[in-house]
Amino acid sequence: MRGMMWIRSAVVCLVLSGCAGTKPPLPETAAELLGQDGAGLFNIGDFDGALRCYRRAFGEAQRIDNPALQARYRFNTGRIFYECALYDSALNCFGESAGLFTIAGRSEEAAVAGIFEVLVLAFFISADSAALLLPSRSADAGPDNDGIAATVQTIVSMLQGDLPAARRYSDRAMASARQQRDPFAIGGMFYYQAMIAFAQHSSAAVRTMLDSSLLYYSRSPVRYRNWKSLLGRSIVDYCDGDTVSGERFYLRAKKAAPNMVAFPGRDLVRNCPEAW
């Protein structure tokens, strides 16, 4: 089946001696500042730099014995590994994150980590097994995270080859993204809907959806994901025989791709792969 490959300030306080009324920083401050730096690097696609920050933040959270912060940075580390298709490492991070969130009494966040664990299982082990696990893992996620659950169900359904179900879940996820006015999430759902259209051999619809994806990504401060939409444009143009446009989008995607990502070779893209 076609359409499966498409499937990322430092704050310094100078306390002068003799200043009255100053308070020592909270013990969480060091971990949180490192986490903020990591998030900024992740959003622009510097995954290597983000990974270093998240590991240091996790170490600080361990030092002060804060399970909630430990869970957050294990989850963020898992996101990097997932985006880089390092599924074994991602699975370990999300599983550990879910356990730590549970210890911290954060049931909704634990459920979200569990949803991502299921997503990795779909790629790494079996989409059918992931589909069976997803309802129980998402049960406590809460209405605010319905879009995340629907997005993962979209991907799982595509991996199962159930395109009608994938379309239904993608519409639900898109409605949630629009309700939350989240341009990054909207861009992501246009991308997944483009994958569905490609599997249905509708090139014009693929281009329209990918262009919409790129438009919404451009309105988001999160910059790392647009490379996949650019690569999708390259693939569909090559598939339709437009080698000039295919090459142009390929080079744009390669330039935009985060470090640590295994970017596909030109020959694979040029030959119109059946499985993306």
Image: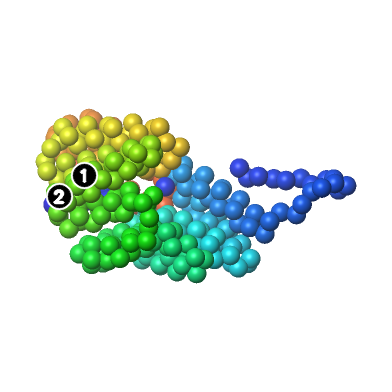
Residue under the image location 19 percent in, 47 percent down: 168
Label of residue 195 in the image: 1
**Label 2: which secondary element:** helix
Way the structure is coloured: rainbow
On the image, the x and y values in percent for residue 69 come to 55, 60
Dividing the picture into quarters, in which one does residue 236 lie?
A: top left
Dividing the picture into quarters, in which one does residue 182 lie?
A: top left
**Label 1: which secondary element:** helix
User: Closer to us: mark 2 or mark 1?
Assistant: 2
- Pick the residue in front: 97 or 251: 97
On the image, the x and y values in percent for residue 90 come to 39, 62
| CA neighbours of label 2 inside 10 A, class few (<14), some (14 to 19), many (20+) | some
Amino acid type, callout 1: Met
Q: Is residue 231 visible?
A: no
On the image, the x and y values in percent for residue 4 come to 21, 51
- Pick the residue in front: 51 or 253: 51
What residue does disc 2 label?
163
Residue under the image location 33 percent in, 51 percent down: 146
The furthest residue to the left: 201
- Pick the residue in front: 73 or 148: 148
Q: Is residue 236 visible?
A: yes
The furthest residue to the right: 18
Q: Is residue 128 left or right of residue 40?
A: left
Is residue 155 placed above or below 120 in the rendered structure? above
Q: Is residue 103 left or right of residue 140?
A: right
On the image, the x and y values in percent for residue 207 come to 21, 33
